[in-house]
Amino acid sequence: MPVHRERTDPIRTPAQLELCHRRWLLPDDTGRAVPLPLVARLWRGLLDLGVLDASSEAQLERVALPPAAPADESDLPAAASAGALLAGAGAATWVSQVVFPEEGRRDPYGDEGPDPGYRDYTLYAIDSPRFLLVPLPPVELSCGACGRTGAPDLTPFGAAALLDLEASCPACGARRDLGRDRARLRSGAIFLLEELCARAALSIELPRAPRDDELPDAVVAALLRDAFGGYDELADDGVPPA
Ligand SMILES: [Zn+2]
């Protein structure tokens, strides 16, 4: 039976007011290379369009792969952050900035005027043939070879996680198989593992769910296509802020 990407259901808790909404924009083909210069150009484009604030700071976290030492975290001028992405060879990197559309920033979801509240933009780039980003970390993985189901062995990274393609099933020893292993999200939805993985992704975190499922800003959408080729949008609602 084919599995399709779908919205994940929000989890309703008493603390929902403190929870946020995240939209993940990621290449629609896990196998497509996303070179660091394209990722850097996407971040530069968001600065040039005024989505991000070039006069303010950005945060950067980088971990060499495979992850052995703790990640390096630093603050840097946002204007320098696009260039810093280029230095992520052989590493997993995220760069992030929080902005407020009411302060004049362009809001890619605000086609009907700025929606109040913050936007957290975080761009992830994984420069490795062995590791992939998992934006919505599953709670359970099923081995496609033997059917064994268990908690996934993932490395947390920002609001996402890293998947090691050289990891193997503890029951049968088969390597992870993106096209055969299945992953269950906390919402209960089940996906083929490859549908949940990416070499790069942009997350946009908002305090309220955007009115549109798809990014309404055609100029920002074109920037994403330049970097990612075709892209998918995954919704994650009711999650703790990054
Ligand atoms: Zn197995």
Image (tube, helix red, strand yellow):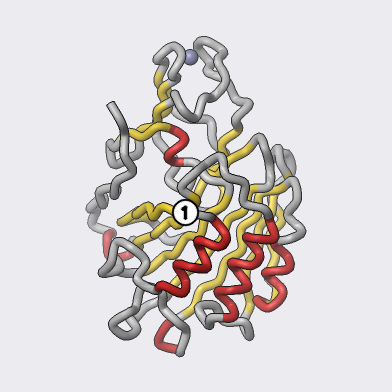
The percent position of residue 110, horizontal first and vertical second, equals 34, 78
Whether residue 191 appears in this view of the structure is: yes
Is 108 on the left or on the right of 113, as rendered? right
Secondary structure under the numbered disc 1 in the rendered image: loop
In this rendering, position of residue 241 left or right of residue 200: left
Residue 49 place in picture, x, y as percent: 53, 81
Classify 98 as above or below 232: below
Percent across and percent down for residue 208 are: 30, 69
Q: Which residue is rendered at x = 68% and y = 47% of the image?
A: 127
Q: Which quadrant holds the N terminus?
A: top left
Q: What residue appears at the point 27 percent right and 60 percent down from the top-left corner?
A: 16
Residue 65 sits in quarter: top right
Query: Is residue 156 in sight in this rendering?
Result: no
Vertical comparison of 149 with 136: above or below: above
The residue located at (65%, 54%) in the rendering is 93
Residue at 66% across, 64% down: 40
Q: Amino acid at mark 1?
A: Gly
Front-most of residues 186 and 235: 235
Residue 107 point in image, percent of width and height: 41, 78
Q: Is mark 1 within 8 Å of ligand 1?
A: no
Q: Is residue 24 above or below residue 58?
A: above
Which residue corresponds to mark 1?
230
Using the rendered view, name the quadrant where residue 129 is placed.
Answer: top right
Q: 165 or 205, which lies in front?
A: 165
